[in-house]
């Protein structure tokens, strides 16, 4: 497939195409303002829109990223952490013992290692 013919959007934002062939598309997503589960939309030239029943995408914050915490370092030992409404955080690392974790309408998801 010619890369010029492939157009991918996720939550209405363009996913910048890196490569594509007849079975795979690789693209880099743009940022979203909040955690959300959304659909992937693929348009391939004049062939139309691909059916993406099993291609949900989840924008999620990760505990270890300073972007999750407004540019600050992740919560340190003995600190107070808040997960706000509409925010979903993936616990992707072990954490120090916190003073308190308040989940105020958001979600905390655990990453399972096998």
Image: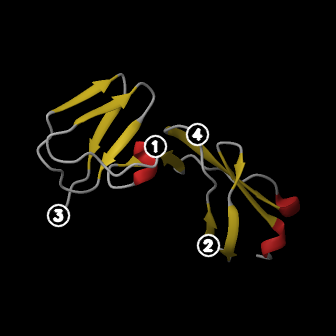
Residue underneath mark 3: 114
Q: Residues within 10 Å of mark 3 (few under 14, many from 20)?
A: few
Earlier sequence position, callout 3 versus callout 1: 1
Q: Residues within 10 Å of mark 4 (few under 14, many from 20)?
A: few
Quadrant in the picture for the C terminus? bottom left
Quadrant in the picture for the N terminus? bottom right
Q: CA distance from mark 1 to mark 2?
A: 38 Å
Earlier sequence position, callout 4 versus callout 2: 2
Q: CA distance from mark 3 to mark 1?
A: 31 Å
* Residue 33's disc number: 4
Q: CA distance from mark 4 to mark 2?
A: 31 Å
25 vs 76, left or right, is: right
111 to 86, vertically: above or below: below
Q: CA distance from mark 4 to mark 1?
A: 12 Å
Give the x, y percent position of residue 17. Answer: 70, 68
Give the x, y percent position of residue 33. Answer: 58, 39
99 vs 75, left or right, is: left
Residue underneath mark 1: 70
Residue underneath mark 2: 23
Q: Residue at x 52, y 47 (%)?
A: 56
């Amino acid at each position: 497939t010619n890369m010029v013919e492939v157009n991918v959007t996720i939550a209405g934002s363009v996913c910048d195409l890196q490569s594509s062939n007849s079975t795979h598309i690789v693209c880099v997503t743009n940022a979203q303002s909040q955690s959300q589960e959304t659909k992937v939309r693929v348009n391939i030239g004049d062939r139309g829109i691909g059916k993406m029943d099993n291609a949900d995408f989840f924008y999620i914050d990760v505990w270890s990223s300073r972007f999750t915490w407004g540019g600050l370092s992740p919560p340190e030992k003995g600190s107070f952490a808040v997960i706000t409404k509409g925010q979903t955080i993936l616990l992707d690392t072990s954490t120090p013992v916190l003073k308190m974790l308040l989940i105020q309408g958001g979600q905390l998801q655990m990453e399972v290692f096998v």
